[in-house]
Image (cartoon, coloured by chain):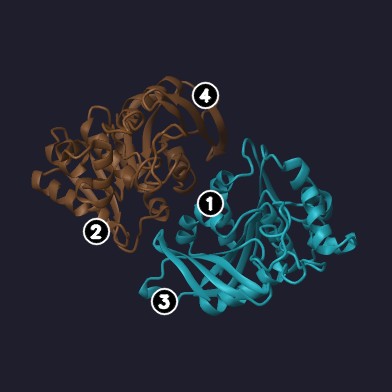
Chain colours: A brown, B cyan
């Protein structure tokens, strides 16, 4: 693990690292925000919020544009921000923005040419937390949050692993990927033609089957240009109503799909997670 | 004036415009943040904070990375963010980042080939406020703030025109450009070899001559890589002490020259300006 940069932010440190991922079989970048680590706090262990970004992003978009450090510093939460796919010349790719590098969809691919590297599900669930918990002043309380493709990833990884997380939230998630063009294209390529294998990566399907019910907050802008065709929060809401899952989904008039929307509501999401991450 | 984009942010609108600048003799982009304009507030006129960005920036860096909208919304202040130089194929340029496009230094050039377009001083002081005050729900209370080259610009434009502004602030300003490599290169090119003409664009010189004393806040990171060679806040501080100017200059341990520094202290700067912009 190599430190690439370290920048003071709200009394803490915004850092970027490179490491060789065994799971993804390539070098990866990730970013971390550490609240103030004064000498007197050196023994303190912080809980962690994992943030998963959307299509085309790296670990830098959220770090630079969401304004999350202010509340993370105030609440005492470490932020961990992985990249959105394996990367590099030796990693399969497509010229389109919605498949290949920058579009890992937080799943374990089973098909050629993707399966050698595209295992973001295992990376985010296992390898990255192990690395974080071995090298940073954190405890084992974890929450997960994301935007768009990363909102899908947060919902899927959280719903399938309720013992690993205290809470889940998402901005503008791809909530029912089996039934939208982005999801059908990516799942078809990464998972193959058998749609039954897609279900374990579809938040709307998983929510209906959830035995343990983590708190979930979803924020959606009503002027989001991808709302009806790609995101389908109403499918998730219907699944929650059908099974009585206490999903909190908020529709915000006038907001679009951008980081300006995320920045406007990141404080609410951090406070939501803090209620569980910091609970006694 | 053409609206290029409009994005909801913290209940207000982040907008980008293009217009044909007479002063700069080229089309220009600028950005505006408007706090919530609910129907019942339609008659309200907001004060304006002008933000001047640093070398290589456009109007988008501050808009996306500083997190200023939150406090602008809360306090009720319009943000206006111009580009950092004239732009376009017909505008003189140099390949280096510190001269030409992206490096206008907020002055009126007198030398060839610059003088046909490089008049950012008049643009920021006159043309842009006229445009803003004719087209947006603002009053004539103005404050000015900036970063690095833009901190220089804010100090110079504010100190020379105290009747136009309520208050001045700067992050990491080029505080004594006549005595640093960036300033000597730019002033030599734009203003020519006669250094006496440089003085009207040097904050340290101007502060020592100021008859009317606007409130000034300067924030400087102690780990800023440009601190000693380019920024020279101590020269500004010495000038203030020599003449008894009540300059408030704060040195922050550990912070660098980046937008992470700006984001960490933008709330303080907005509250500083609000004390004057919103005073009865």
Q: Residue most toward the front?
A: A112
- Measured as percent of width and height from the top left, residue A186 is found at 28, 43
Can you tell which quarter of the image residue A209 is in? Answer: top left
Which picture quadrant has residue B35? bottom left
Same chain for the residues under marks 1 and 3 in the image? yes
Quarter-of-image position of residue A243: top left
Q: Is residue B134 above or below residue A232?
A: below
Q: How far apart are the alpha carbons under marks 2 and 3?
A: 32 Å
Q: Which residue is mark 1?
A: B66
User: In this figure, which residue is indicated by the disc labeled 2?
Assistant: A228
**Do discs 1 and 4 share a chain?**
no
**Front disc: 1 or 2:** 2
Q: Give the spatial CA distance, label 1 vs label 4.
A: 30 Å
List the residue tagged with mark 4.
A40
Label 1: chain letter: B
What number is the disc on residue A83? none
Labels 4 and 2 in the same subunit: yes
Mark 2 or 3: in front is: 2
Task: Decide if residue B278 is on the left or right side of residue B221.
Answer: left
The secondary element bearing badge 2 is classed as helix
Q: Contact, CB < 8 Å: mark 1 with mark 4?
A: no
Disc 2 with disc 3 on a shared chain: no
**Residue B172 x, y percent position in the rendering:** 67, 48
Secondary structure state at the residue bearing disc 3: loop
Mark 4 vs mark 2: in front? 2
Mark nearer the viewer, 1 or 4: 1
């Amino acid at each position: 693990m190599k430190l690439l940069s370290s920048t003071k932010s709200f009394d803490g440190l915004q850092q970027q690292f490179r490491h060789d991922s065994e799971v993804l079989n390539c070098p990866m970048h990730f970013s971390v925000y550490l609240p103030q680590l004064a000498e007197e706090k050196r023994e303190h262990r912080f809980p962690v919020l994992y943030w998963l970004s959307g299509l085309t992003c790296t670990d830098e978009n959220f770090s630079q544009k969401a304004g999350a450090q202010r509340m993370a510093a105030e609440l005492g939460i470490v932020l961990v921000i992985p990249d959105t796919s394996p990367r590099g010349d030796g990693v399969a790719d497509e010229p389109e923005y919605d498949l290949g590098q920058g579009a890992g969809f937080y799943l374990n691919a089973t098909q050629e040419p993707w399966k050698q590297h595209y295992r973001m599900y295992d990376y985010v669930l296992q390898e990255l937390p192990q690395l974080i918990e071995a090298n940073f002043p954190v405890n084992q309380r974890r929450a997960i949050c994301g935007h768009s493709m990363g909102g899908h990833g947060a919902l899927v990884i959280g719903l399938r692993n309720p013992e690993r997380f205290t809470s889940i939230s998402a901005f503008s998630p791809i909530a029912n990927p089996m039934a939208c063009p982005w999801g059908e294209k990516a799942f078809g390529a990464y998972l193959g033609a058998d749609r039954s294998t897609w279900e374990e990566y579809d938040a709307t399907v998983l929510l209906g089957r959830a035995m343990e019910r983590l708190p979930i907050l979803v924020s959606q802008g009503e002027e989001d240009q991808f709302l009806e065709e790609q995101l389908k929060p109403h499918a998730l809401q219907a699944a929650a109503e059908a099974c009585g899952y206490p999903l909190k989904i908020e529709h915000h008039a006038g907001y679009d799909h951008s980081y300006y929307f995320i920045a406007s509501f990141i404080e609410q999401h951090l406070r939501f997670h803090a209620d569980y991450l910091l609970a006694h």
